[in-house]
Every structure is written in structure tokens, then in C-alpha cells.
Amino acid sequence: MDSRTAILGRILDHLPIDPKSRNLVTEEAALAEYGVASLHLITLLLNLQREFGLGGDTFMDVDMPSTVGELVSLIQDALRRAGATELPARA
């Protein structure tokens, strides 16, 4: 499994998606399709920041993602900047 797929899986754990529909989610899908509005996006980013062990200022001065793929890329870039060579284990 590549890191994008693993990151996507962890993101999906935080979205209100029917488990049977998880495999239908594409990176092109708008976060709004899954009920992610601005406040929910901030909460989601904070949860993902904590889950991936990223620093408190990780998402300062970044463009907010609007698609699932943009969110995956945001996490992937943050992990790369933090020097992570693999995904942190799930808590």
C-alpha cells in the first residue's frame, strides 16, 4: 500500500461516510460532498495533525483543501517537511 492510499484511509476514518461506500471515494471528490464545511475542516485538520504527530503550526499559512486529494497532498507534504520516512502508527 502506498502512502497516499494509507493517508486517504485515515482521512476517511474521520469523515461521516458509510463504510460500504469508502471504496467509492475518489481524490477528486469535493470535501463538501461529505459534509465538510469550514468549521468541520478545521476540526478535521486538528485531528489529523494529532493523529500523524505533526507540530502545532503545521497547517498555518496553507491553502485550505477543497477536495479529498488536496487534503491527502496537504498531509503528505506536511509529513515530508517533518522528515517522516513512514506513517506514524495508529494510536
Image (tube, helix red, strand yellow):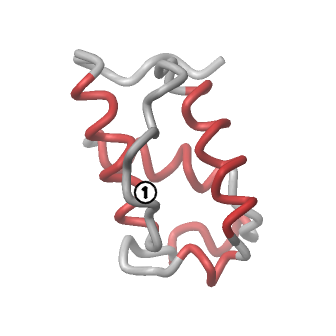
Which residue is rendered at x = 59% and y = 44% of the image? 45
Residue 76 in percent (x, y) is at 30, 40
In the rendered image, which quarter is residue 41 located in? Answer: bottom right
Residue 69 in percent (x, y) is at 36, 65
Residue 71 in percent (x, y) is at 43, 57
Q: Is residue 20 left or right of residue 4?
A: right
Mark 1 packing: few (<14 Cα in 10 Å), some, or many (20+)? many
Which residue is rendered at x = 48% and y = 27% of the image? 57
Q: Is residue 80 left or right of residue 59?
A: left
Residue 49 in percent (x, y) is at 55, 31
Quarter occupied by the C terminus: top right
Camera-side residue of 13 and 31 = 31
Which residue is rendered at x = 51% and y = 69% of the image? 23
In the rendered image, which quarter is residue 68 located in? Answer: bottom left
Count of number-bearing discs: 1
Camera-side residue of 18 and 41 = 41
**Vertical arrangement, residue 38 with respect to residue 59, above or below:** below
**Vertical arrangement, residue 74 with respect to residue 64, above or below:** above
**Vertical arrangement, residue 7 with respect to residue 64, above or below:** above
Q: Is residue 81 left or right of residue 32?
A: left
Quarter occupied by the N terminus: top left
Circle 1 residue: 71
Q: Secondary structure at mark 1?
A: helix
Q: Mark 1: which amino acid?
A: Leu
Which residue is rendered at x = 45% and y = 39% of the image? 60
Camera-side residue of 18 and 80 = 80
In the rendered image, which quarter is residue 88 located in? Answer: top left
Q: Is residue 17 left or right of residue 76?
A: right
Camera-side residue of 24 and 37 = 37
